[in-house]
């Protein structure tokens, strides 16, 4: 004789089913909100093509392989573009943020207020993750809006600060660059 499921378990099963349905509904609703549905950077820049690439070295050590992606050649800084960094070494998020701020300061033609630098460093430290050999971080420049940062294709943060975004990407694309040869290779000026 087949055994029927005891009626005692039915309300519990229904509660689990309702809870699962609510979780699914909530996840779907959150995915529809801006900033929660992190499209890959490639989806945000569908016509992207590599403009140039090169390796950043320091004291003979390979730090990362950089590739600049944009929808047009030559690079139009008034249009979105992406900078992909494939890391070859281990670096903490705090070190990435502090080094970025040091380079922003070094490259700025005018002094930047200490409060602004502190705010920018905090935003970058929140957005970055620790990296190691084989990790990939991608920055997507959104002119006039700011930038998005990705861990491969997973969005880490969107920073709505056009000045920080411009200063951040200037580290690689502006002058005086720490590595002029890399800058030129990224811009497709050097084979």
Image: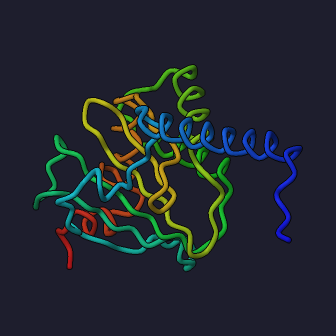
Furthest residue in direction left, as rendered: 73
Residue at horizontal 65 percent and vertical 61 percent from the top: 91
Furthest residue in direction front, as rendered: 1
**Colour scheme of the picture:** rainbow
Residue 14 falls in which quadrant of the image? top right
Residue at horizontal 33 percent and vertical 38 percent from the top: 166
Residue 186 falls in which quadrant of the image? bottom left
Q: Quadrant of the N terminus?
A: bottom right
Q: Position of residue 160 (x, y in %)?
A: 40, 29
Q: Is residue 105 visible?
A: no
Residue sitting nearer the eye, 152 or 93 = 152
Residue 134 falls in which quadrant of the image? bottom right
Vertical order, 137 against 133 (above or below): above
Residue at horizontal 62 percent and vertical 53 percent from the top: 129
Q: Position of residue 172 (x, y in %)?
A: 36, 55
Residue sitting nearer the eye, 18 or 5 = 5
On screen, residue 73 versus residue 153, left or right, reads left
Residue sitting nearer the eye, 149 or 104 = 149
Residue sitting nearer the eye, 173 or 140 = 140
Q: Position of residue 121 (x, y in %)?
A: 58, 35
Vertical order, 6 against 105 (above or below): below
Vertical order, 93 against 133 (above or below): above
Q: Quadrant of the C terminus?
A: bottom left
Across the whole image, how many numbered discs are drawn on residues? 0
Q: Position of residue 64 (x, y in %)?
A: 49, 70
Q: Is residue 65 visible?
A: yes
Residue at horizontal 31 percent and vertical 59 percent from the top: 42
On screen, residue 111 versus residue 191, left or right, reads right
């Amino acid at each position: 004789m087949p055994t029927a499921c005891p009626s005692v378990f039915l309300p519990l099963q229904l509660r689990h089913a309702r809870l699962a349905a609510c979780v699914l509904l909530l996840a779907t609703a959150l995915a529809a909100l801006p900033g929660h549905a992190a499209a890959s950077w490639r989806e945000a820049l569908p016509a992207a093509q590599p403009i140039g690439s090169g390796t950043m070295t320091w004291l003979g050590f390979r730090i990362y392989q950089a590739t600049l992606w944009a929808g047009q050649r030559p690079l139009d800084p008034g249009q979105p573009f992406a900078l992909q960094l494939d890391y070859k070494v281990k670096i903490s998020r705090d070190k990435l943020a502090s080094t970025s701020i040091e380079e922003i300061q070094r490259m700025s033609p005018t002094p930047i207020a200490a409060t602004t630098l502190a705010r920018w460093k905090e935003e970058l430290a929140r957005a970055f993750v620790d990296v190691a050999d084989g990790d990939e971080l991608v920055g997507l420049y959104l002119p006039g809006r700011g930038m998005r940062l990705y861990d491969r294709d997973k969005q880490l943060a969107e920073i709505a600060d056009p000045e920080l975004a411009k200063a951040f990407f200037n580290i690689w694309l502006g002058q005086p660059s720490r590595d002029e040869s890399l800058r030129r290779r990224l811009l497709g000026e050097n084979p």
